[in-house]
Image (cartoon, grey):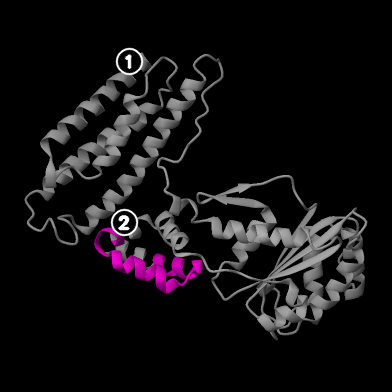
Amino acid sequence: MSADHLQFLKNKFIQDLEEAKEEHTGENEIPLLSHFLGIKGVLEAKEITSSTPICLKNCLYDAMSALEECVVLSEKREPRKKKDGPMRGYTLAEHCFMHKTRRMLLRIQRKLAATAETGASTSSSSVSLVPVIKRPFSLDEDVRIAYDNFEEQKTKILYRLQNRGKGFQEIVILGIGGSGKTTLARLVSCRQRVSWGLEIPLGPELWDIKIWIHLFKKRSSGDVVELKEIIKDMLKQCNEDEQLDDEDLSEDELLEILGNGLKGQKYLIVFDGIWDINIDWYLKLKQKLKSVSSVDGHGYGHVIITTRLPLKARMMVGPRNLYHIQPLPPSSMEFRLQNNYELLFDVLERYRPKMKDEIVDRCDGLPLALYILAEAMEKRIWDQ
């Protein structure tokens, strides 16, 4: 019975779409027609059987409802005069509606396609269907390499940490604000591969212990980093804080406890965001870390520091251990704009293509600058 119901909905959607195409052609074609045709193609290639999940009826109902609303929208547009203007005969509210509907149709197409694929692979088995959602579109070569910049830089940092000798190794990721230093350090610490805009973990783990210290939160009122507070935070993250027992221990005593916890271990420590001009705390901490990082193959220590202060970076790790983060190429910046701010990208692509290129150019490869600007522009579109 459920298969008959789904077959009826499938046939009705295809029939309604064909009628809408015939009635609205040329300049008056229904909006988002290509997305509806994509769903139709998936449905035509899909065979409805008794094993097809009945929950797909919700997808078909949503697709039919969206088709009706787009037909009505097309009929409202027909009497309007300015169809070739910047808004193409639609109001701003109608553009927002089409943006939401487009995203819904993409989700419907993904779900239908995923169920079709898993249904084919499990038709001869009693295993329940587990949909695997795939990307609904194929990306050209420029978009495929959009994220390669961070992937390449992450690989370089990992190589330098692992291949410059055993024991203690350190590196500074140096760059101006908003260039992605923290993001790159996070990708290295998680050992993730960036692909098609997704972060995919790689295994096995390189480190037994990973510690992340946000240094901009550790500054006192006098802009001086308190080493004791840092050590206590490190002990908590490596599960050695039970040895503190609320005692007022000195720096040297805390360092000894930390050294015992890290001795013989494979650890990574990230100091994110060094602003303090006084680096004595790090030099003292590094001396202890070096003493407990063995060179006999039983343990090693890696330290990553992010900062925008080149002079202090050289004083901390030396000129050979600096990594200057590279700005993202225009293809990557444009892909981030399209992937994270679809409404803004669509409006710029249709009506202001030169402005889109200018935004990418003015942000100069800085992801944070792009996000702040795009967020403000898209908010203004929604407000209007």
Label 1 element class:
helix
Q: Nearer the viewer, mark 2 or mark 1?
A: 2
What crowding class fits label 1: few (fewer than 14 Cα within 10 Å), some (14-19), or many (20 or more)? few
Q: Is residue 365 magenta?
A: yes
Point out residue 54 in the picture as x, y percentages from the top left corner: 40, 23
Three-letter code for the amino acid on which mark 2 is drawn: Asp
Counting from the top left corner in percent of width and height, residue 295 is at 91, 60
Residue at the (23%, 58%) spot, across then down:
92
Q: Main secondary structure of the magenta part?
A: helix
Asked which secondary structure carries label 2, the reply is helix
Question: Where residue 333 sits: x, y (%)?
Answer: 45, 63
Mark sitting earlier along the chain (2/1): 1
In the image, the segment drawn in magenta is 348-375
Q: Is residue 349 left or right of residue 325?
A: left
Residue beneath disc 1: 4
Q: Which amino acid lies under the numbered mark 1 shown in the image of this protein?
A: Asp
Q: Residues within 10 Å of mark 2 (few under 14, many from 20)?
A: some
Q: Is residue 167 left or right of residue 318?
A: right
The residue wearing badge 2 is 346
Direction from residue 91 to residue 364 in the image, left or right: right
Among the 4 quarters of the image, the one containing residue 347: bottom left
Which quadrant is home to the C terminus?
bottom left
| Cα gap from disc 2 to disc 1, whole angstroms | 39 Å
